[in-house]
């Protein structure tokens, strides 16, 4: 009889200790879960900013024509993947879209740049010319195009 009483007391103590341990871990790890969610959200925002940074370098800046040509080459992969359009307006032409044309929120396939280095062509971009660069976003605030207009 003595054995069953001590076994019951040990079982009760073990049960109380287990419940206390569970309660303690819930109280400790609940705030950590919220902190992890906040950190994940912050990380996602930072990733988005880094992804857009290559375009934001051209937002409301004045750059040379050689930088415009370099940007056209730099964004070739994104352009061919229908992610970005490049618009260039020089003093000689009324404007050309490369890779994709932005119309409202929609990108439609446009021609690839072929004569930007040919000085006898209307598409020619003067390397020493100065261009005002801006980015264009759709209604969802996604960067869809970069626009270069010669001053």
Image (cartoon, grey):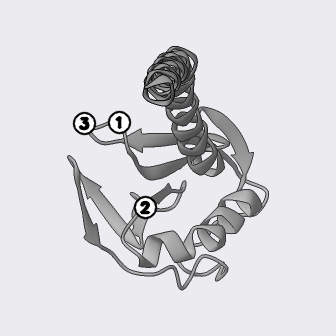
Label 3 residue SS: loop
What separation in Å lies between label 2 and label 1 (alpha carbons)? 13 Å
Q: Disc 1 and disc 3: Cα gap in Å?
A: 5 Å
Quadrant for the N terminus in the image: top left
Name the residue tied to disc 3: 139
- Rendered-image quadrant of the C terminus: top right
**Can you see residue 55?**
yes
- Along the viewing direction, whichever of 62 and 106 lies nearer the viewer: 106
Residue at image point 49% right, 70% down? 78
Q: Residues within 10 Å of mark 1 (few under 14, many from 20)?
A: few
- Whether the residues at callouts 2 and 3 have beta carbons within 8 Å, the answer is no
The percent coordinates of residue 120 (x first, y second) are: 60, 81
Q: Are marks 2 and 1 in contact (CB under 8 Å)?
A: no
Spot occupied by residue 113 in the image (x, y as percentages of width and height) = 51, 79
Residue at 61% over, 37% down: 46
Which of the marked residues, 2 or 1, is nearer the chain's N terminus?
Answer: 2
Residue assigned mark 1: 141
Mark carried by residue 84 = 2
What kind of element bears circle 1? loop
Front-most of 37 and 45?
37
Q: Label 2 to label 3, Cα distance in Å?
A: 15 Å
- The reply to whether discs 1 and 3 touch (Cβ–Cβ < 8 Å) is yes
Against 101, residue 6 (above or below) is above
């Amino acid at each position: 009889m003595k054995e069953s009483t001590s076994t019951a007391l040990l079982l009760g103590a073990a049960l109380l200790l287990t419940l206390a341990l569970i309660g303690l871990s819930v109280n400790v790890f609940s705030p950590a879960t919220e902190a992890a969610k906040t950190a994940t959200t912050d990380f996602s925002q930072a990733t988005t900013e880094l992804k857009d940074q290559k375009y934001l370098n051209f937002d409301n800046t004045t750059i040379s024509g050689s930088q415009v040509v370099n940007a056209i080459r730099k964004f070739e992969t994104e352009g061919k993947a229908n992610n970005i359009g490049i618009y260039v307006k020089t003093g000689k032409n009324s404007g050309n879209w490369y890779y994709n044309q932005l119309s409202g929120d929609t990108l439609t396939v446009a021609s690839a740049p072929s004569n930007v280095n040919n000085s006898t062509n209307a598409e020619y971009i003067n390397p020493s010319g100065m261009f005002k660069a801006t980015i264009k976003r759709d209604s969802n605030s996604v960067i869809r195009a970069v626009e270069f207009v010669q001053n």
